[in-house]
Amino acid sequence: MMEYFLIDNGSLRPGSVLQMRKIAQELSQSSGHRVRPFGLMHSHKIDPNRLDGEPGVSMQEFLSSPQADTIDEIRALPFFLGPSLAITDWLPENLQLWKDKQAETRKFRILKPLYQPGDDRLVRAISELCHRAVIRAGFTLPYVALVDHGTPLPEVNQVRENVGSEMEKMISSVVSGFSTCAMERRPGPQYDFNDPLLENLLSRWVADGAREIVVSQFFLLPGRHAGPDGDLAEICQPFEKNGVRIERSENLGDHSLIKDILLERIRTDLQSDEKP
């Protein structure tokens, strides 16, 4: 018995889990194979009453539960932009522990994260969401900040930089300025590749006279960072109180091009099973 698991970091915010469910359901319908949504951690802790009465699930809880005995093969479909430690370390280690309990019958496979060199769909998706934000706010030549969470891994940061470089080219005719940035970072010069921080970038732009800014959220789901009342909104609030107009783009996860990537991952994976 083989199933696809759509896996993100996990969240304590109901909106994140509900959106994951919607995406997994659409992938199940499009692919003809069951796709189940899982957070790595935390999602099982949410009150089911906040999730339409259906409890959230996490890999952390599932792999140590009797339910893990009801499946023989897990195909992990990462809902991650790049090669996060969550899917390069935590997930393979814990799936291997699950497999070792019944090594002769259990299998697992971890598919690629969303960003792959040469595929412009992430760039097209984030650029389209940025354009929507510009139109929604009625801005004329705003400044645009492409922001991610920040990371200790240069290879994860490089995903943001690669997407940002192509995005800047795609939207250059409708903006006054562009920069990548991070929401937060670890201290120490070895993590300088995350800079600038969003807060510092906004301060610099406002000092230079910017009054219309789009914060383009390089986030997939509305968790505690990119949700309506999340950390990014909190960072923007003091500038907005001082008269700066800031429009945050929608999160990437529900964009049709993201679903196209995920569906392609499944179809390519199934085709690999057919090869001799």
Image (cartoon, grey):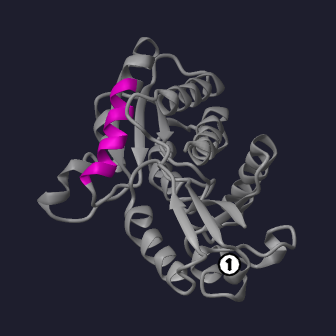
Task: Decide whether residue 182 is among the magenta residues.
Answer: no
- Under tag 1, what secondary structure? helix
Residue 183 drawn above or below residue 169: below
Residue 133 sits in quarter: top right
Horizontal relation, residue 4 to residue 180: left or right: right
Residue marked by disc 1: 44
User: In this picture, which residue range is highlighted in magenta?
Assistant: 154-166
Image quadrant occupied by the N terminus:
bottom right
Q: Residue at x 70, y 74 (%)?
A: 71
Front position in the image: 165 or 67? 67
Q: Amino acid at mark 1?
A: His
Residue 52 drawn above or below residue 255: below
Q: Position of residue 168 (x, y in %)?
A: 37, 23
Q: Residue at x 45, y 29 (%)?
A: 119
Q: Residue 202, can we see it?
A: no
Horizontal relation, residue 84 to residue 55: left or right: left
Q: Position of residue 227 (x, y in %)?
A: 60, 55
Residue 250 sits in quarter: top right
Disc 1 crowd rating (10 Å Cα; few below 14, some 14-19, many 20+) is many
Front position in the image: 247 or 56? 56
Front position in the image: 90 or 101? 101
Image quadrant occupied by the C terminus:
top right
